[in-house]
Image: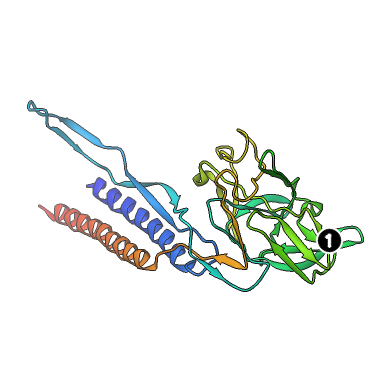
Amino acid sequence: MSNLFNIGVTGMQAQSNSMAVIGNNISNSGTCGFKSSTLSFSELFTTNLGQYSNGTMTQYGNGVQTTGVTTDWAPGSVTGTGNPANLAITGEGFLPVAYEGEIYYTRAGDFTLVETEISAGVTGYVFMRPNGAVLLGGTADPVTGMVSIGGADPTDYLYFDSAPTSYEVSASGEVSATGANVVNGNVGVQRFNNPDSLEKIEGGLYSPTSLTSYSTGSEGSEAPAIPGQFGSGNLLQGNLEQSNTDLVTAFTDLIQAQRAFQGCSKVITTADEILQTVLSLK
């Protein structure tokens, strides 16, 4: 009898987690560069009570557990914004950014041009996201197809030494400007063999883990590629990638998870009724 209660509880916990994932997908359906997620399930250990002479096993499961969250890395739709600081990627790559002194990666290119301090007494105009993440730039090497971006120090930012009259970002990541000099004027794009190994950080940022494998450049290289190289994708200035959440699918999944949750709760109430019946027997 106790197994019925445990099975119902594990099911309710799993479906509750599933609704949390689906709800997050729905709530971020308007978030720039957001990638929807799916929760995976697996059966808990199976109880074996023996085997009949014809080979049939007597066995049953003991509930369900969650086994991980996978991300749908399919690109979202790209829309024009008219803002020259906005960037979208046509392929599978990520933009390297500096955030709180560390290098992270993002698909969201909702940058604006912001004046900030580069070093003591030196200011520059950088590409900054609403959460404060700043686009990193570097020097492109056409021979290796890589962009050397240094670290996450302000001197590694891609910046203009004064307010530009106008500026352009080419499909291959080269930045040019009128009325200002460009420092670290090449944008690199990083691509990963196993993006599901990335750790999600707030604000659409991703951090590599010890299991993350880089797929740009030579084996083991962590330098981003020149956009368009190694399958990293090209840049589109004045555009933004939208969320890839499919609201129709998300609402359908939400209804299914809700019904499953209700079913698991019914298992618990039914088990309680049976137990009460057994206890009332005389």
- The number of discs equals 1
Which secondary structure lies at badge 1?
A: loop
Few, some or many residues within 10 Å of mark 1 (<14, 14–19, 20+): some
Type of amino acid at the residue the image marks with label 1: Asn
Asked whether, in this view, residue 49 is left or right of residue 209, the answer is left
Q: Can you say whether 129 is above or below 187 in the image?
A: below
Instruction: Residue at 53% x, 53% y: name it.
Output: 91
Question: As drawn, which residue projects farthest toward the right?
Answer: 121
The image shows residue 209 at horizontal and vertical percentages of: 59, 42
Residue at the far left: name it: 54
Residue at image coords 56%, 71%: 80
Out of 218 and 210, give the one closest to the viewer. Answer: 218
Figure check: 35 above or below 163: above
Residue 1 against residue 247 in the figure, above or below: above
Q: Position of residue 147 (x, y in %)?
A: 70, 45
x and y, in percent, of residue 69 in the image: 44, 50
Q: Position of residue 180 (x, y in %)?
A: 83, 65
- The residue at the point 52 percent across, 61 percent down is 34
Near-viewer residue (137 or 260):
137
Question: Would residue 276 appear left or right of 127 to someone viewing this image?
Answer: left
Outermost residue toward the bottom in this view: 82
- At a point 57% along the width and 66% down the height, the residue shown is 240
* Figure check: 166 above or below 57: below
Q: Which residue is mark 1?
A: 181
Which of the two residues, 270 or 71, is positioned nearer the viewer here? 71
Q: Please, which colouring scheme is shown?
A: rainbow
